[in-house]
Image (tube, grey):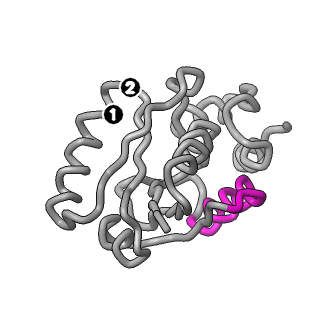
Amino acid sequence: MRIAVYPGSFDPVTNGHLDILKRAETIFDRIIVAVASDNNKDPLFSQRERLDLLKDAIKDDKKAEVCSFAGLTVSFARECGAIAIIRGLRALTDFEYEFQLALMNKKLDPAIETVFLMTQSEYSFISSSTIKWAASLNASISDFVPPNVEKALMQKYNKSV
């Protein structure tokens, strides 16, 4: 079985994330969507909330599971028996950072590959940060996130859906 880990903060999960997941499922037998607990970000949603939002968003997906992890992604991938780490790229600006991570991960564990998937053009401008910003200003975000995430964001910002 070809297992891949799809790590991220997912604060919150977007339709762009879900698109990368669906496309990765055409390559791998099982995808572990891994919510990082210790990244250098200040999340809006708690780790429990991010896990719950993701689980609800992919509840009908038979090839994916959601879990949390701490520490190095490559170590977590090894523990899961994964052969690859999935990373999504939106723009050229993402590439330099992601390339550095991939090289470090390859040095730490040469058996685990990093697979980059380019986002669909319709999602290329979507980021969790811009979604949160738009939601805070009561903009319609229904085209960019699953319904459960839209509801959760609007509740966080005390807005009506």
The part of the chain drawn in magenta is: 47-62
Viewed as shown, does residue 7 lie left or right of 151?
left
Residue for badge 2:
91
Is residue 4 shown above or below 124?
below
Q: Say which element carries label 2.
A: loop
Please state the horizontal and vertical placement of residue 105, each as a whole percent of the image.
23, 59
Is residue 80 shown above or below 141?
below
Point out the residue furthest to the right here. 160
Q: Which residue appears at 38% of the width and 26% of the height?
A: 91
Is residue 78 shown above or below 92?
below
Viewed as shown, does residue 97 lie left or right of 83?
left
Q: How many marks?
A: 2
Closest to the observer, 63 or 70: 63
Please state the horizontal and vertical placement of residue 139, each as a whole percent of the image.
72, 26
Which quadrant is home to the C terminus? top right
Residue for badge 1:
94
